Structure formats: structure tokens, C-alpha cells
Image: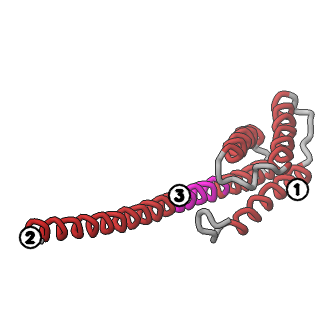
Amino acid sequence: MGIVDWFGIIGSVCSIAGIIFAIFQIQKTLKAAEAAQKAAESATDAIQLNVTLANISACIKEVEEIQALLRTQRYDAALLRVTDLSGKIIQLKAMPQSKFMQGKRDGKRHLTQLSILKTLLEEKLVNNKNEINIANANKFLSEISDDFNVWIGANKYQSGGTK
């Protein structure tokens, strides 16, 4: 065996070592890409959860405003807030993280009750003779607020994707 043969053998060994090294690097890169994807999904879930929490908190504030407006008989402003709250609940229902609203009847029931209250308020503003049972309105508004608070309590401290 001559020197050329030795260079050929050394070159083949180096090529095999390079291929093995490349395979390990590819596996390492694949694991890093998978970890980055999981981190991105987790961050997205956490952001969606926080947005949902903020929107539900806004709904709770809206409910409290409606109750205060009904107590002070400011029916025109209450009507605007009921309309706003209905829109926010519909938006919550469409959000990916709002599992509170998806597949449950509470969202539909809440929207139905708000629609009835909206109709009563409109009739009150048009025909001042109609009376609104403030106690009943506050009761179902409190139910809405309680349902939202239960959802917040169940989801507030969960990190994204671990539900």
C-alpha cells in the first residue's frame, strides 16, 4: 500500500466522520426547531388567554355599569350598555380561547336574557308606561357576572396550552 492509498483511506474515514457529525447536527437542529415551535405555540396560547381574560373582565365591568344605570333609572344609557355587552359576548364566543362560551348554553342564555332586557328598555324609552323589574334584571345580570367570574377563577393562573 502506497501513500496514495493511505490518503484515500484517511479521506474515506473523514467523510464517514463528517456524515455522522452532519446527522447529529441535523437532529440537534430539528430538536431546537421543535422546541421553538412549542414555545411559540405556548406564547400564543398565553396571549390568547390573557386577551380573553381582559375581555371577560370588561364584560363584568359592563354588567356592573348596567346594574348601576338601572338603579338610577338611566334607561337610555343602560340600553347602550346592554347592546355593547351583547356584542362583547358574541365576540368572546368567537375567540379561540373562550372555552367558557363554546359548547355551553350559558352564552346563548345570556344573549337571550340581554335581548329581552334590551327589548324592555326600548319599550320603556318609547312608552314610558312599561315598568322594568329591576330586581329580576339585576338577578340575571349577576348570573352573567358570576359565570364570567367562575371562568376567570378557573383559567386565570393556567399557562397557555395546559388546560
Are the residues at dot 1 and dot 2 in contact (C-beta closer than 8 Å)?
A: no
Within-10-Å neighbours for mark 2: few <14, some 14–19, many 20+: few
Q: Quadrant of residue 120?
A: top right
Query: Which residue is at 63% across, 59% downward?
Result: 53
Q: Which residues are magenta?
A: 41-56
Q: Nearer the viewer, mark 1 or mark 2?
A: 2
Callout 2: SS: loop
In what quadrant of the picture does the C terminus appear?
bottom right
- Mark 3 residue type: Glu
Furthest residue to the left? 3
Q: Nearer the viewer, mark 3 or mark 1?
A: 3
Q: Which residue is mark 1?
A: 139
Query: Which residue is at 82% across, 32% downward?
Result: 122
Comparing 122 with 94, the one in front is 94
Are the residues at dot 2 and dot 3 in contact (C-beta closer than 8 Å)?
A: no
Q: Is residue 128 above or below residue 31?
A: above
Horizontal and vertical percent position of residue 71 = 80, 52
The overriding secondary structure of the stretch rendered in magenta is helix
Q: Which residue is mark 2?
A: 2
Callout 1: SS: helix
